[in-house]
Amino acid sequence: MSGNGSGIKACALCGKAFFGTSEDMACSDCEARYRRLRDQVREYLWHQPGQVAPIMQISADLGVPMKVMRALMKDPRFKGKGLEEN
């Protein structure tokens, strides 16, 4: 990958290879669904300020697939936002 974080990535939802930046987590076919799931998790965390939420609990509460939760752990927009691997 180059200095701006662009390169070949695997889609967090379907696994298909695509070209994207460090903030791109899904291919163009899955981007809208990924954004909806990401927004659900963001809203969930917003209602729990200052708390750490295990990704397994969020997955169970919201029905968000674990592979998406793991992708959110890598998403730069979620760094320091209260997600925990357990």
Image (tube, rainbow, N blue to C red):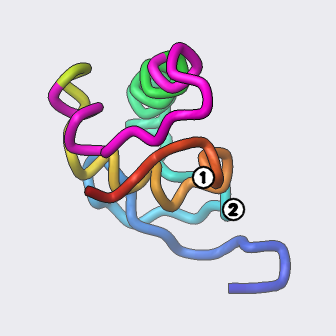
| Residue 50 falls within the magenta-colored stretch | yes
Secondary structure type for disc 2: loop
Closer to the camera in the image, 14 or 70: 70
Residue type for callout 1: Asp
Q: Residue at x 29, y 31 (%)?
A: 58
- The image shows residue 44, relative to residue 9, as above or below, that is above
Q: Residue at x 58, y 19 (%)?
A: 46
Q: CA distance from mark 1 to mark 2?
A: 5 Å
Quadrant for the N terminus, please. bottom right
Q: Quadrant of residue 64?
A: top left
Q: Position of residue 25 (x, y in %)?
A: 51, 52
Q: Which residues are magenta?
A: 44-60
Q: Position of residue 2 (x, y in %)?
A: 77, 85
| Residue 25 falls within the magenta-colored stretch | no
In the image, which disc is placed on residue 21? Answer: 2
Neighbor class of circle 2 (other Cα within 10 Å; few <14, some 14-19, many 20+) is: some
Residue type for callout 2: Thr
